[in-house]
Image: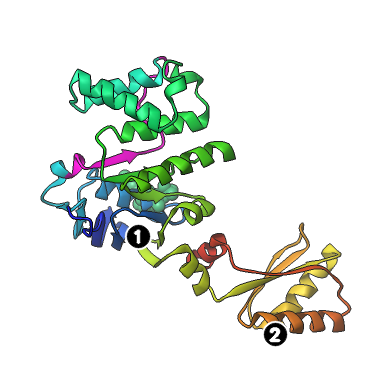
Amino acid sequence: MSRTTPAIQAEGLTKNYGDKAALAGFDLTVPAGTVHGLLGPNGAGKTTAVRILATLLRLEGGRAQVAGLDLARDAALIRHRIGLVGQYAAVDEILGARQNLYLFGRLYHLSRADARRRAEELLERFDLAEAATKPVGQFSGGMRRRLDMACGLILSPRVLFLDEPTTGLDPRGRGEVWDCVRDLVAGGTSVLLTTQYLDEADQLADRVSVIDHGKVVAEGTPGELKARLGGDRLDVVVHDESQVERTAAVMARTTGNEPVTDTERRLVSVAVTDRVRALSEVVRALGEEGIAAEDLALRRPTLDEVFLQLTK
Ligand code: ATP
């Protein structure tokens, strides 16, 4: 596999469960050495796509190459070139990180010496050396997930599938996992990441595919996807909850777009194309209606807003 061969290239993948299509023509290209985020609402087909590409589910329709090999023909070889980190690796809670990694190495048919060496390398790399003998049952969430990732990397895979790597972690644990992913990618590993946290995709992914009903509905860098939503957002916070609805009506009329409201925060937010003009027109219209704004802000949309727009 040369440096320019994509880590993953999939075209028209299909998968049906009975008469329900879990994947309905799924396309994906992940250039080598990059992180690709796969986003989608529950049931969109993310796990199905990952399981097919990781050779755990049989390819039904379409074709794919993973780590330079053909998925239909070379599944057994692909397994030696990929790693899969799901919610929890099957580690022993009583043993420490070192012994768990050693056992995983043996499971992957490394010699005793190689398994020992690989365990030490991974302990160092995932910042687990100090906890090498501590029972895994006593690990923090972040440490546990770092060990899960280390287990998926025993064979130095070129392509790593990370399925929701930070679900349930606190901000510190998430930061630790993010640092590990960045390190891996700096070392040349390609990553396909599914996540339910859009800020995670924003932080980590070079490109993102939004998937809905088994198909990619948008693809691009996080910045491109935000730009595609149509420029900026104008947020207005009013003094009084009772003014939220009237404010939304004024903003809809002035901008021609449908605002989103959050009554509890007294917030009305709307997409705007010409930011300065929209700002001055909204201010004027609110003034005419006798509505006083407590705060006004122009900002870029978040990936969450892009996502909701694309999958609503
Ligand atoms: P989530 O975020 O909830 O994990 P997902 O995007 O990973 O969702 P998939 O798990 O790939 O979605 O599921 C895609 C569709 O296929 C869903 O409608 C799901 O109900 C269906 N599905 C998945 N696995 C099976 C199965 N083994 N048998 C029947 N239907 C299934």
Residue 221: image quadrant is bottom left
Q: Which residue reaches farthest left? A: 73
Which element type, helix, strand or loop, lies under badge 1? loop
Of the image marks 2 and 1, the number of the one nearer the N terminus: 1
- Residue drawn at point x = 41 percent, y = 58 percent: 206
In the rendered image, residue 278 lying in the magenta stretch gets the answer: no
Location of residue 92 in the rendering, given as x and y in whole percent from the top left corner: 37, 19
Taking depth in this image into account, of 11 and 122 the one nearest to the observer is 122
Location of residue 240 in the rendering, given as x and y in whole percent from the top left corner: 86, 64
Judging by the rendered image, the residue that carries numbered circle 1 is 214
In the rendered image, residue 88 lying in the magenta stretch gets the answer: yes
> Circle 2: is it few (<14), some (14-19), or many (20+) Cα within 10 Å?
few
Asked if the beta carbon under badge 1 is closer than 8 A to the nearest atom of ligand 1, the reply is yes
Disc 2 marks a residue whose amino acid type is Arg
Judging by the rendered image, the residue that carries numbered circle 2 is 277
Location of residue 100 in the rendering, given as x and y in whole percent from the top left corner: 34, 21
> Circle 1: is it few (<14), some (14-19), or many (20+) Cα within 10 Å?
many
- Residue drawn at point x = 69 percent, y = 81 percent: 276
- Residue drawn at point x = 19 percent, y = 25 percent: 110
Image position of 302 with respect to 133: above or below? below
Taking depth in this image into account, of 20 and 25 the one nearest to the observer is 25
Residue 65: image quadrant is bottom left
Give the magenta-colored segment's residue range. Answer: 78-94
